[in-house]
Image (cartoon, coloured by chain):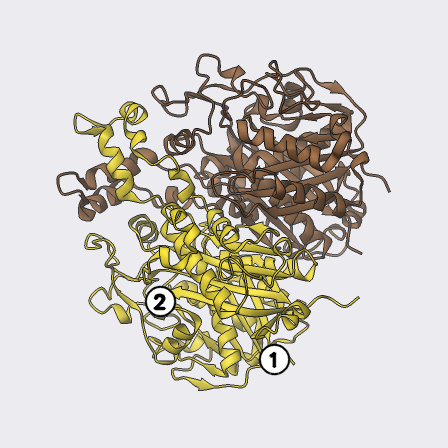
Chain colours: A yellow, B brown
């Protein structure tokens, strides 16, 4: 029996370049950079003061009327996921309980699942501070007073705003998706791992449709603090935010925090055809592995975990490396990491590396954490679908030893097969292959 | 046809023992791991007790030459490091796996790329004192706003880079991948209380379909800290029986008033059958079924008719190709909340019909408390042991019948029962339903 085939039929993106896949791809082609000085809190005591901040639409206008009360339980990470899921469902013209509350849905809820990768969600500090203030005694925080008074200032459902599985849960409730439901929590690899696992669910006949991807906001004080403490951030361009994130450039000086969500709708091929869905591309391979470094922050110099993930995805897709036309790299813009990733790419593609178009997107909207790999996969799909590869920006001088083909202008391209890869602190790596449908 | 998946090693670090055999002995004896909370001063909290892992040192279990790298592991990472080492060693695997196979001696090992990890791992405990100091120092109550400069000054002075990194939920798996040299899929999920059951199920799928040959799976969590207890107390999910902590966890009992928070880790080595045979590994049990669904109902409550749970259990039975008559024992989710226990009873009756009254069912949470993300892993381990020893652990503190929970929950005393096939259920916050079925291994 032939394997079931999986196609992508809907795309939803939200990040500093806007909401929706059309706005996103157009912004990429326009050379837009959505990185600016942080607005949502005062960053002046931080060494890195820039970020890719995403829009803040009214959640009550995104969710069904009956679900408006529940938006009070949505942390920023959840909001981003819900926004992108809504965009993806509408983009794919899927009829769910949300879009067709009275009428006919065109999916079977028990055969439709969710897999949304999430990050480490920090509680809202202002909300917490208001409560903690009630526990201050003699100018100091008192745990005893917190137990008797302070904690009672928090809304009873407080914890539910910050559980990472709530991204998947809200989406499953809004759209009535009762199939397999997971929440992958592998930091910056989460979004791509979620898409990969969801793809396999359909191949293995556990579901016919999956809503998958990732969402995270690193644009808050703890998110920025953590990256600054680890020495990973771009600190020399606070006066020139648009130049701050420089993946694969000789002057790559660190990552820029971002926030966003990338969500795809994927379906079994015949299921999609019956629905008359637009078929963007086929997911043909998924690979996952691990970088190994005792500091748990950077990849090892060879980024061997990235090599293995790419090779596994190629093997599953039954493609030789020469067949790949485009690779969306992780391109985090930390020089040592970029160097390692370039090494891993060369190890996979060998002489073909000279021809393989490589694109790094974080220069445009920052590092969206759990969403990053999902947004990059969407970028690969859009490039394939539109026949255009957006330019690499902020990369005027890539070191020659990287050996990568990083075009500085938009390109027309007839893409048959594209890949995206990612890795994270901690070590986890992932890669996906998408192919044009014949 | 998919490949068969067997369990070849187990390990645990829990409130009732830092290894599997001690845990099992004390569960069968009906002991409680619940006591006054000492990890932090919870004296004024609504709930002042929990089930802690006390006195565990992960460094002692690690080979000396790699201790330095894991010295700063967060509390929950320490537990899973210990549990995983126990399981890995029981499975007779080398620490670490070699990068490449050399002819002869390691010929029976799969390559490192086919060996991975899949955990239901919680976030690490927050660095509360420093975190709250920054929060309080930044807050300007007269202006009703945060002074972020003051916040940052305190935060940068007090927070530690590595301590923050260790809180990320992918770090427990990262530690394991590094210790054992894993280059296969390295995944972590966090579907609340169902997380490690889910991890084990998803890991099983990876092996069935050839994406890995061996996986360290299981889970770990430690939420016994001020914000964790705050969160659950605000939800009124925790028992507040402060006068008698050991009686507080009362799954299915008429006087239950919530769950008891616990911490710990459970690890299992699962592998493809032929791989296990070639290696000469001991096969402890076979994983034959997995079901996973979402209630898609409310973030606050389970579906009132248990529709997601019913679907997950049925999915697992179908996946295992066994009928309702073949389940000999069920390890219940049984948290001890009013809602879970009555809905879980409903689910069991709906799926099993009259047979529901004949199947022995128990919840070890009565003794161990609720390990949140790690619960499912430890509970599956008890299912393996039930099969091995033909005895089921009790549900303790079951002294007041609840007409809504009238099944055989093996009250108070462990019971010798024939167990060939066992089921474990986990139902997580937000409506995540996961079920595993295992069987005594037979060719």
Q: Which residue is drawn at 60% across and 42% down?
A: B433
Q: How many numbered callouts?
A: 2
> Which residue is drawn at the image coordinates 41% and 20% (left, top)?
B48
Q: In this view, does B385 lie to the left or right of B172?
A: right
Q: Name the residue located 48 percent from the left edge and 13 percent from the top edge.
A: B244
Pinpoint residue A296: horizontal percent, then vertical percent.
Answer: 46, 50
**Residue on which the image places disc 2:** A365
Horizontal side of B253 relative to B318 (left or right) equals left
Q: Earlier along the polypeptide chain: callout 2 or callout 1?
A: 1
Taking B113 as reference, is B154 above or below it?
above
Q: Is the residue B11 above or below the residue A395 in the image? A: above
Under tag 2, what secondary structure?
helix
Look at the image and tell me in which quarter the C terminus of chain B lies.
top right
Is there one chain holding both mark 2 and mark 1?
yes
Task: Please indicate whether residue A90 sits to the left or right of residue A276 in the image.
Answer: left
Closer to us: A337 or B360: B360
Task: Looking at the picture, tell me which residue is in the foreground, A423 or A27.
Answer: A27
What is the chain identity of the residue bearing mark 2?
Answer: A
* Element on which disc 1 rests: helix
**Residue at numbered disc 1:** A322
């Amino acid at each position: 029996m032939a394997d079931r085939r999986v196609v992508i039929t809907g795309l939803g993106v939200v990040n500093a370049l806007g909401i929706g896949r059309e706005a996103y791809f157009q912004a990429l082609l326009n050379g837009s950079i959505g990185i600016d000085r942080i607005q949502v809190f005062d960053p002046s005591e931080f060494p890195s003061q820039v970020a890719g901040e995403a829009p803040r639409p009214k959640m009550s206008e995104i969710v069904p009327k009956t679900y408006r009360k529940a938006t009070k339980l949505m942390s920023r990470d959840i909001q981003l996921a819900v926004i992108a899921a809504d965009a993806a469902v509408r983009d794919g013209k899927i009829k769910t309980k949300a879009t067709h509350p009275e009428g006919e849905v065109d999916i079977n809820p028990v055969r439709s699942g969710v897999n949304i990768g999430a990050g480490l969600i920090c509680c809202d500090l202002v909300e917490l501070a208001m409560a903690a203030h009630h526990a201050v005694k003699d100018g100091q925080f008192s745990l005893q007073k917190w137990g008797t008074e302070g904690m009672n200032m928090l809304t009873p459902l407080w914890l539910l705003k910050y559980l990472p599985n709530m991204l998947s849960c809200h989406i499953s409730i809004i759209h009535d998706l009762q199939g397999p439901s997971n929440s992958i929590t592998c930091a910056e690899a989460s979004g791509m791992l979620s898409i990969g696992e969801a793809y396999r669910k359909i191949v293995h006949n556990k579901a016919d449709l999956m809503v998958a991807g990732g969402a995270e906001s690193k644009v808050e004080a703890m998110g920025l603090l953590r990256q600054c403490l680890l020495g990973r951030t771009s600190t020399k361009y606070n006066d020139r935010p648009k130049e701050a994130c420089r993946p694969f450039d000789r002057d790559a000086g660190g990552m820029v925090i971002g926030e966003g969500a990338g969500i795809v709708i994927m379906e079994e091929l015949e299921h999609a055809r019956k629905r008359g869905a637009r078929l963007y591309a086929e997911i043909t391979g998924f690979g996952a592995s691990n970088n190994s470094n005792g500091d748990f922050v950077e990849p090892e110099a060879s980024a061997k975990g990235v090599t293995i993930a790419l090779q596994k995805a190629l093997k599953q897709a039954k493609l030789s490396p020469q067949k790949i036309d485009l690779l969306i790299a992780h391109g985090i813009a930390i020089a040592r990491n970029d160097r390692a990733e370039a090494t891993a790419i060369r190890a996979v593609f060998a002489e073909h590396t000279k021809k393989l178009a490589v694109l790094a997107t974080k220069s445009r909207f920052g590092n969206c954490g759990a969403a990053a790999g999902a947004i990059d996969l969407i970028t690969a799909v859009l490039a394939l679908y539109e026949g255009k590869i957006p330019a690499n920006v902020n990369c005027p001088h890539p070191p020659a030893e990287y050996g990568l083909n990083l075009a500085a202008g938009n390109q027309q391209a007839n893409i048959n097969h594209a890949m995206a890869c990612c890795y994270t602190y901690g070590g986890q790596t992932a890669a996906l292959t998408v192919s044009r449908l014949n | 046809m998919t490949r068969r998946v067997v369990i070849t090693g187990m390990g645990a670090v829990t409130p009732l023992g830092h290894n599997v055999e001690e845990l099992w002995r004390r569960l069968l004896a009906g002991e409680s791991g619940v006591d006054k909370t000492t990890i932090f001063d919870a004296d004024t909290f609504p709930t002042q007790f929990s089930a802690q892992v006390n006195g565990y040192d992960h460094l002692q279990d690690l080979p000396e030459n790699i201790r330095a790298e894991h010295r700063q592991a967060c509390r929950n990472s320490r537990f899973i490091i210990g549990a995983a080492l126990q399981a890995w060693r029981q499975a007779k695997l080398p620490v670490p796996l070699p990068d490449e196979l050399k002819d002869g001696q390691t010929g029976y090992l799969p390559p490192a790329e086919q060996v991975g990890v899949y955990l239901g791992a919680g976030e690490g405990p927050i660095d509360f004192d420093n975190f709250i100091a920054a929060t309080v120092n930044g807050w300007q109550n007269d202006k009703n706003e945060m002074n972020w400069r003051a916040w940052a000054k305190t935060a940068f002075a007090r927070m530690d880079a590595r301590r923050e990194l260790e809180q990320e939920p992918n770090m427990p798996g990262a530690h394991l991948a590094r210790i054992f040299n894993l280059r296969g899929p390295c995944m972590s999920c966090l579907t609340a209380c169902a997380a490690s059951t889910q991890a084990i199920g998803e890991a099983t799928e990876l092996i069935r379909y050839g994406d890995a040959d061996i996986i360290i799976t299981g889970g770990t969590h430690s939420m016994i800290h001020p914000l964790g207890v705050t969160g659950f107390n605000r939800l009124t999910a925790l028992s507040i029986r402060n006068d008698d902590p050991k009686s507080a966890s009362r799954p299915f009992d008429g006087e239950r008033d919530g769950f008891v928070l616990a911490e710990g880790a459970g690890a299992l080595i699962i592998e493809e059958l032929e791989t296990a045979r070639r290696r000469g590994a001991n096969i402890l049990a076979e994983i034959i079924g997995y079901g996973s669904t979402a209630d898609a109902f409310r973030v606050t409550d389970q579906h009132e008719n248990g529709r997601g749970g019913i679907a997950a259990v049925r999915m697992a039975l179908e996946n295992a190709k066994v009928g309702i008559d073949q389940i000999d024992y069920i390890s219940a989710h049984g948290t001890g909340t009013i809602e879970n226990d009555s809905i879980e009873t409903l689910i069991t009756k709906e799926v099993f019909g009259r047979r529901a009254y004949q199947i022995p069912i128990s919840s070890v949470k009565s003794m161990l408390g609720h390990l949140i993300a790690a619960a499912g892993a430890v509970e599956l381990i008890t299912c393996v042991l039930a099969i091995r020893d033909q005895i089921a652990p009790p549900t303790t503190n079951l002294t007041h019948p609840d007409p809504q929970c009238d099944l055989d929950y093996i009250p108070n005393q462990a019971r010798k029962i024939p167990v060939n096939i066992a089921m474990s259920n986990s139902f997580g916050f937000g409506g995540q339903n996961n079920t595993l079925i295992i069987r005594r291994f037979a060719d």
